[in-house]
Each structure stands twice: as C-alpha cells, then as structure tokens.
Image (cartoon, coloured by chain):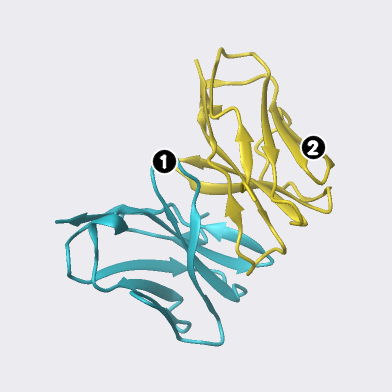
Amino acid sequence: DAGVIQSPRHEVTEMGQEVTLRCKPISGHDYLFWYRQTMMRGLELLIYFNNNVPIDDSGMPEDRFSAKMPNASFSTLKIQPSEPRDSAVYFCASSYGQGAYEQYFGPGTRLTVT
Amino acid sequence: DQQVKQNSPSLSVQEGRISILNCDYTNSMFDYFLWYKKYPAEGPTFLISISSIKDKNEDGRFTVFLNKSAKHLSLHIVPSQPGDSAVYFCAASANKLTFGKGITLSVRP
C-alpha cells in the first residue's frame, strides 16, 4: 500500500481565496482524521470520520472550515475564505480504529496564506 | 487548555547516551498513551505505546514509563543515535487522540 496520500504538498494562496486539501486514506481503514500543526498549538485534531460519516468536528476552528468524505477512499478539507492565520501544516491520517489504534499519517500539506 | 503537555521544546544529547523525553497530562480519563516521531517534511509515525494498566513498555532501544499518580510519562531512548534526531509527540487517548506540542531531539555525533 502507498500509505496515506495527500495533495497538494504545498499550497500558497492569497487571503480570501478558497483552499481545498485532499486525502486518500489507506485502503481498509475505517477512520480518517484531519489534523493541523502549528508552532503555537502543536498537533490539533480538527475532525474525524468513521465509515465516511463525520463523528467529531469540535476541533474545526470556524465555519470557514469544512470537511467531507464522499467515499471510503477520498476526503477533502476546505477553507473558504482563507486567512493568514490558517497558515500551517495540515495532516490527514487513517486507522482501523480510534483512540488506542495506531494512526498512519500522510506527508502533510504546507499551507501558506499571504 | 493543553491536556497533554510537553514542557521542554528541545533536548540535545550526545550519541550513545540516554535521551529522556517527558510528558504530563491532566485528564484522568486518558487510558492509552502513544509516542509518535516526526522527521522534517514527513508525517508523524507511531513509535511506542502503553496502556494505563501498565507502568512500563519496552521495544528495543525505546522504553515508555507511565506514572499514573503523577500523570506523567516519559520516553527513554538508550543508546541514542543520530538517526533519532526528530520531533517527538506524546499523545493520549480517551476515545480520541490528544497530542502535545512536541519536543525536538538532537543527538550529537
């Protein structure tokens, strides 16, 4: 398996633009997680899905953020409109379960909003 | 409110010596603890874990110790190698994972 795939790897955009981050989880994993990494806050869980259904989105910072998982092999995280404070590295991870189960992370998308 | 705290942002150790990475937590409901390792431009990868019913788990050069009464865990790396230089995240689970901010370990040759 190729592991968790994220695209793009780098994204530079201007404030106010829409940004879409993409993730392909490992086949067979029932859980998908979106995280954001910043120097100030470390790794924060934004939202996670189980069998394509959003379970907990309490970490999503604002209504400008939305996530979807239309099928078991694809998820998107969208920011509209983007702001400079959204600049961070966004990780997608997948696993067979939640909590104690090992999560497999993608390489991340480094987002810069100018 | 940081429920998982890694208070030291960095640690530098001589090759061959022991590295001790510390982590504190506040939520008594956490029942499983994990350490992840992250190299630059890569995602975190799982390193080692421990259940709250244990106080020690060992895997090769890596040992994690858990002190529930103090709400403290630590990762010991012996002997440290230059390839261990990375960011180490402590994570705790009570249904979902909560990560600390990470600590950057530098192992000097």
| Amino acid type for the residue under numbered disc 2 | Lys
Compared with residue A39, is residue B20 higher up or lower down, i.e. above or below? below
Residue B11 rendering spot, x and y as whole percentages: 24, 57
Query: What is the distance, in whole Å, between disc 1 and disc 2 at their CAs?
Result: 26 Å
Tags 1 and 2 on a common chain: yes
Residue denoted by label 1: A39
Query: Judging from the image, what secondary structure is the residue with disc 2 in?
Result: strand
Residue A7 rendering spot, x and y as whole percentages: 62, 30
Residue at 41% over, 74% down: B73
| Amino acid type for the residue under numbered disc 1 | Met
Residue at 29% over, 56% down: B83
Q: Are marks 1 and 2 in contact (CB under 8 Å)?
A: no
Query: Judging from the image, what secondary structure is the residue with disc 1 in?
Result: loop
Residue at 61% over, 67% down: B93
Colour of chain A, in one word, is yellow
Question: Residue B12 has which mark?
Answer: none
Residue A81 rendering spot, x and y as whole percentages: 67, 19
Mark 1 or mark 2, which has the lower sequence index?
A: 1
Along the line of sight, which residue is nearer the eye, A2 or A82?
A: A2
Q: Quadrant of residue B8?
A: bottom left
Residue B3 rendering spot, x and y as whole percentages: 52, 61
Residue denoted by label 2: A68
Colour of chain B, in one word, is cyan
User: Outermost residue toward the front?
Assistant: A1
User: Tag 2: Cα neighbours inside 10 Å, few (<14), some, or many (≥20)?
Assistant: some
**Mark 2 falls within which chain?**
A
**Residue A54 at least partly seen:** yes
Please tell me whether mark 1 or mark 2 is closer to you in this view. 2
**Mark 1 falls within which chain?**
A
- In-image side of A60 versus A107 (left or right): right
